[in-house]
Image: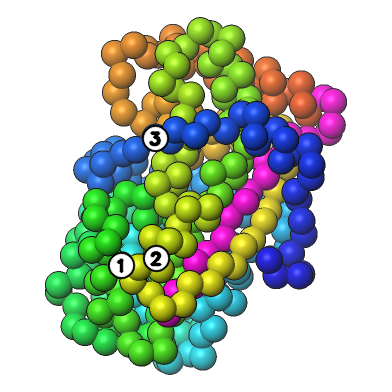
Amino acid sequence: MNTTDPDFRTPELDLLAREIIPTEHFEFSTETARDRFFHDTRMLDTKQRVHNVFRTNPRSMVDHMRDNLRLTGTEDLLDLGCGNAFVLEHLRPSIADGTITGLDNAPGVLDAARRRMLGTATPCTWIEGSADDLSMLDDDSFDRVMANYMIHYVPDLDACFREVRRVMRPGGIFQLTTDRPDSMLEMYQVHFTALTEMGAPADLHRATPKGRLSLDNGRPQLARHFDHVETATWQDQLRFTDPEPFMEFYRVGHNHCCASSEPDARLDEDFFIELRDRVRAQVVAAIGEKGHFAVTKYTGSFLCS
């Protein structure tokens, strides 16, 4: 980890993670992600706003990404799953004399990316497509490739990594950013506690979909395709003194820790009203006891070449 970053890990949090984070994780198809999560930008907008307002690490996640990419200003950059171009907007001044290509399979967020970057002098190209099929792109086209918090939605990971290797120039960097399975464990603790109190179905006790390729298990998958795989970690802690911004983060940004990600006949609106009430009560209690409710982020990037 960069020595300038704060370290939020404690023995108590490590013990809590072992107690509450399940080994099973949610899995969602690329169609679900496209048609439900990213048919508009609400989920992305909520996460990005909350992270900016409530973070306590003075070095942002985008700062971490920028440092990893080692940009000189003239690179050709490909962003897989570019979303609403929030990251690209902040990176663009560091590649002002380069080019940007953003690819996403969700038309709604891709339109938002076009609008966000409209008028910039840095040439931008926008492609609707899947990250495991880059056949529209030439060999050795990019100096830098990014895939930030999206790889778990890609249908064929091996095909994606082969394609990245093909389109990346010699000496290039592929940055894949994801979480540890126990990232945001305090949010999962209050969520799982509420589910248990309600006697909710056992299959809802699952971890984030990023478990498909996390900081814990991703290196062997990437090492099949890249000669060098380095891990650069980053931590942050969101702190809330009012429950409502957290509740929006939980409900809209994370679909009740994925419980409302897909239709489920067992879970009606009354279920989610009760779930939110029970989660909110725990958050209010934590704020009353500690002065804030904390959500600790354990995240980072694989840097592949």
Q: Residue sitting at 74 percent across and 53 percent down?
A: 56
Classify residue 77 as left or right of residue 192: left
Q: Residue sitting at 35 percent across and 68 percent down?
A: 224
C-alpha separation, residue under disc 2 versus residue under disc 3: 21 Å
Classify residue 114 as left or right of residue 62: left
C-alpha separation, residue under disc 3 versus residue under disc 1: 22 Å
Residue type at tag 2: Leu
Q: How is the image coloured?
A: rainbow
Of the two numbered discs 3 and 1 on the same chain, state the one appearing first in sequence.
3
Q: Residue sitting at 41 percent across and 89 percent down?
A: 171
Residue type at tag 3: Phe
Above or below residue 42? Residue 133 is below
The quadrant of the picture occupied by the C terminus is: bottom left
Q: Main secondary structure of the magenta part?
A: strand
Q: Residue sitting at 56 percent across and 67 percent down?
A: 231
Classify residue 304 as left or right of residue 179: left
Of the two numbered discs 2 and 1 on the same chain, state the one appearing first in sequence.
1
Tell me, yes or no, whether the highlighted magenta stretch contains residue 290.
yes
The quadrant of the picture occupied by the N terminus is: bottom right
Q: Which residue bears the numbered disc 2?
A: 222
| Crowding near the residue tagged with mark 2, few <14, some 14–19, many ≥20 C-alpha atoms within 10 Å | many
| Crowding near the residue tagged with mark 1, few <14, some 14–19, many ≥20 C-alpha atoms within 10 Å | some
- SS under mark 3: loop
Residue 136's spot in the image, x, y percent?
14, 74
- SS under mark 1: helix
Residue type at tag 1: Phe
